[in-house]
Image (tube, rainbow, N blue to C red):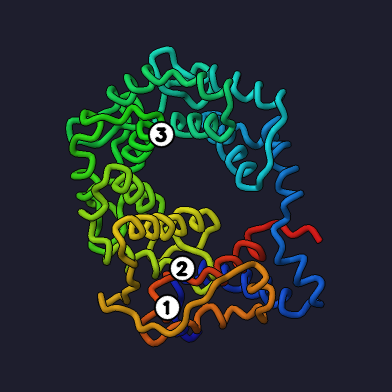
Amino acid sequence: MEPDTEPRGTVTQREQSMVLNDVNMLYHIYATVPPIAQTLMMELQRKNHVEYLLRGLQQLGPSFCSLDANRPWICYWILHSMALLGEFVDADLEDRTIEFLSRCQDPNGGYGGGPGQMPHLATTYAAVNALISLGGEKSLPSINRSKVYTFLKCMKDPSGAFRMHDAGEIDVRACYTAISVASILNILDDELLQNVGNYILSCQTYEGGIAGEPGSEAHGGYTFCGLAAMILINEADRLDLDALIGWVVFRQGVEGGFQGRTNKLVDGCYSFWQGGVFALLRRFHSIIGESPTPVDQRGAECSIDNTQTTTASDVSEGDGSSDEISSQGDEHCHFQHREREPLFHSIALQRYLLLCSQVQIL
């Protein structure tokens, strides 16, 4: 038997090939169906999403038992999504949600993942934002601001960072959730702010993104958390923003979606984490009166050709070819624009979300 001389791909390469095949199949279907079907496929199925969200807020299936410690998160994801869709829950469901989250509030401050569970910064963030998403005279007074402040102080570490829970891990996520909750509840003070920026700065990696802790790998979720926290404490200019932009623009894959780390697969959730970084950068630069500049992987500015305003209807007019996604730049730059925005291909991202991430019900 002759030795196998065919090159064998790595696990990463094989998984990437599988994802590309799946995405190309969906794009091919889109490109070959009649125009009326293309229109339906490229619509955000608002009614179906609202029905799904309302079902989840009232009753979850047995498979969700693994998320028992994340119940405030489920409330937040659902209520925030409803708000984005311009929908509201009825008075009875609102009251039941407030009552449930009140039972998650620890007597000593903070919110746990469920009634009787230990308070945790992540679920405190989720509970507070869920209640704010509801708004009104019942939800907001249910938050014990003074006890939340006491909990945040207890989570403060001498390094300047925060712990996620008592004796828990210290990372950028903890910094963001603590600073965000304190900011939105108007309880942020110098004691909570002390050295937070130094810790986050120490987590920016040689790639340009931000890791969860010093010495770790740059990650989309932590980059969002780190940048958002630095903006909240008015220290974003301490980061190497050119390097950060250079890292995040190259996280958009040929499929149109975003990957969380270098050489990882694209994933629908990173449309928020990585896409949110661009929104934060736009907001930050609008405050200081500058425009973000895309850079290639060598650190040079990308050449610029045309600006486009993108909508879902723009996407539906395309031919659905995945080749179009990867042909927007020159040899070194992914995308080219006459002006300095957008820094990512928003049409490609919309196509990925609507065709690949959204469950199609035609």
Disc 2 target residue: 252
- Badge 2 marks a residue whose secondary structure is loop
Give the side of residue 191 with respect to residue 106, left or right.
Answer: left
Q: Is residue 44 visible?
A: yes
**For residue 18, above or below residue 174:** below
Residue 175, horizontal then vertical, whole percent: 31, 38
- Badge 1 marks a residue whose secondary structure is loop
Camera-side residue of 65 and 107: 107
Camera-side residue of 345 and 2: 345
How much space separates mark 1 and mark 2, taking CA atoms?
9 Å
- Badge 3 marks a residue whose secondary structure is helix
Amino acid identity at mark 3:
Ile
- Upstream in sequence: badge 1 or badge 3: 3
Give the side of residue 10 with respect to residue 317, left or right.
Answer: left
Graded by Cα atoms within 10 Å as few (under 14), some (14 to 19) or many (20 or more), the crowding at tag 1 reads: many
For the point 67% across and 33% down, the residue is: 57
User: Which numbered marker is on residue 184?
Assistant: 3
Amino acid identity at mark 1:
His
Disc 1 target residue: 334
**CB-based contact (under 8 Å), mark 1 and mark 3:** no
Amino acid identity at mark 2:
Gln
Q: Is residue 336 visible?
A: no
**For residue 322, above or below residue 92:** below
Quadrant for the C terminus in the image: bottom right
Q: Nearer the viewer, mark 2 or mark 3?
A: 3
Residue 310, horizontal then vertical, whole percent: 57, 70
Residue 335, horizontal then vertical, whole percent: 44, 78
Give the side of residue 128 with respect to residue 285, left or right.
Answer: right
